Amino acid sequence: MDVILFGATGMVGQGVLRECLLDPDVRRIVAVGRTPTGQHDPKLRDIVAADLFDLSPLARELSGFDACFFCLGVSSAGMPEERYSHITYDLTVTAATMLAGLNPQMTFVYVSGTGTDSTERGRSMWARVKGRTENALLRLPFKRAYMFRPGFIQPLHGIRSKTKFYRAFYALAGPVLPLFKRLFPRYVTTTEQIGRAMLAVAKHGAPKVILGTDDINRL
């Protein structure tokens, strides 16, 4: 299986990249982002793109793939809706539209989050934008598309968030997250489980297209 990975330097993306590198069924991984992953492996190739909104110069290099794991995203904190929508909706849908044209047999997996609003009409700005993004992705002509909606995510294997606020949160909450996961397994997943679940749906599919924390953990 050949995989494209967006957002490989983020917390979730780092976990997904780790599982892809470990999986013997994954033959090739192309990580697309503004910065390199900093990792070296025979299966991995970094593509540093100056403008993620225009990937047309990379069309040849992004053809012939079986799956795309889209883990790129930003926090909505302090961000106006127009700006957040530009980064979240416009960037994601632009990239996905191009990939659907190049790889019609591709499985596309997008990471949104618990609380995403599929109606696009709720009071929460980020949830509306994420819902609009999910709906647009599900309309694209991929072979299969899945929306991952994790809740709390426990980073494993030395993985750290790039966001200062989240690093501080995990520094405080990290010691109790394993206990919280044991007590409330339906609400907590890990970077390892998300990566493995993405590989599972790329290989075998899933019974539904929107997958919450419980679904991710089962996969």
Image: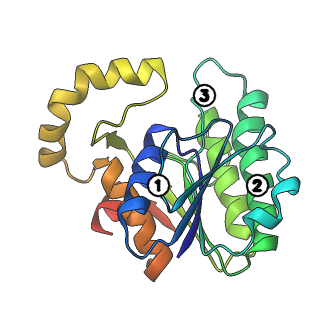
Which residue is identified by label 1?
41
Can you see residue 114?
Answer: no
x, y (%) of residue 17?
45, 53
Quarter of the rendering occupied by the C terminus: bottom left
Q: Quadrant of residue 152?
A: top left
- Secondary-structure class at tag 2: helix
Other-residue count near label 1 (Cα within 10 Å), few / some / many at <14 / 14–19 / ≥20 = few
Which residue is identified by label 2?
95
Amino acid at the residue labelled 2: Ala
Other-residue count near label 3 (Cα within 10 Å), few / some / many at <14 / 14–19 / ≥20 = some
Amino acid at the residue labelled 3: Ser
Which residue is identified by label 3?
76
Q: How is the image coloured?
A: rainbow
Counting every numbered tag in the picture gives 3
Q: Is residue 72 above or below residue 106?
A: above
> Residue at 62% of width from left, 17% of height from top?
78
x, y (%) of residue 119?
64, 53
Q: Is residue 33 above or below residue 167?
A: below
